[in-house]
Image (tube, rainbow, N blue to C red):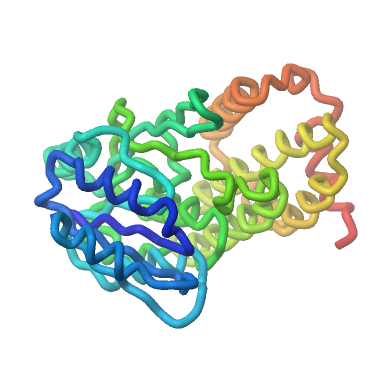
Amino acid sequence: MIDVIIAAYNAHDTIEQALNSILMQNIVDKLKVYIVNDKSDKDYSSIVKKYKKYLDLTELSYEENRGPGFARNYGLKHSKSPYIVFLDADDIFHSHYSIEMLYNSITKGSYDLVISNFIEELAPDKYLPHIRDKIWDHGKIYRREFIEKNKIFFADERSNEDLFFNYLTILSGAKYSFIDSITYVWQNNKESLTRKNDHEFNHTGLDGYNRNLLNLSKILEKRKNMESKIAKVLFFGLLQMYYTFLHFEKINNEVGIDLLKKSTRDNILFFNKYKDDLDINDKNEIIYNELTKYLKQNNLHLLVLPDKTFDDFLNEVLQYEK
């Protein structure tokens, strides 16, 4: 059996589409679906009643709004199937065979995690493919035994909590694999956390992003022989902040620059403890992947010859007064 966990906050206008995409799955008889009600203004009982005829569907709830990280942890705690898939309440699976492809891959290969591709809807008829993405929980399936044995959990954050979960899974030694198929559609919901208020999350989410990476690094620090992995995680995050910083400078976004400096400073200080442990091959791979991604997504041709080097950026942030 496979648990499909849906964190839901005031998602009554979108969740039926999400449930319909589950209902059409070729292995729907193997699915147990959980709507985790993150203290929405009203419950989902009428929707559950409607779909209960066709799905093994349960609503879970608690008394305080805690955010998607807490909701997914709650769903994990109150479910028990051997495999786990997450679906956002405003997203859908890509095809009838999405979960089956993930399930077949994780069982036949005895993997702990299988990662597929997904597409992000930017606008009607405009999509951005995410290939072999390790950050979002979109288009992934997890083996519960590994998650529980290694005490993997979502950060109690309202943003980038899946970054924390996936990196903790991989860095805990998960055996994982990729399938080159699209299984998930990240839909363009303008009221979602990442898109509402004209993508305000692109600024405010920086704090959660950096805090998740820092907290992850502190967890790894308690384990043996993790120095190179800590350096790799923090370098990856800092390089993303560097390219974001260059973009903010290019468009004269002072608010974004200020938030970025404020949220990044502690990560640089922690990185400096481990920067000599960064493997050169890991460093080169991260640089290549991140530069390629930002050039492709943002057409930032000026990044080829930026005004500030990566070291200039680190020094500028360290001089920033909180």
Residue under the point 43% across and 41% down: 134
Residue 141: x and y in percent read: 28, 47
Residue under the point 55% across and 58% down: 217
Residue 32: x and y in percent read: 18, 59
Q: Is residue 83 above or below residue 97?
A: below
Q: Quadrant of the C terminus?
A: bottom right
Whether residue 266 is visible to the viewer of this picture, yes or no, is yes
Instruction: Determine which quarter of the picture holds residue 31.
Output: bottom left
**Numbered circles on residues, count:** 0
Q: Is residue 188 left or right of residue 54?
A: right
Spot the residue most to the left: 29
Instruction: Determine which quarter of the picture holds residue 139.
Output: top left
Q: Is residue 265 left or right of residue 274?
A: right
Whether residue 273 is visible to the viewer of this picture, yes or no, is no
Residue under the point 64% across and 54% down: 210
In the image, 235 versus 8, the foreground residue is: 8
Residue 314: x and y in percent read: 79, 44
Q: Is residue 36 above or below residue 93?
A: below
In the image, 218 versus 306, the foreground residue is: 306
Q: Quadrant of the N terminus?
A: bottom left
Q: Is residue 96 left or right of residue 229?
A: left
Residue under the point 51% across and 39% down: 188
In the image, 48 versus 99, the foreground residue is: 48
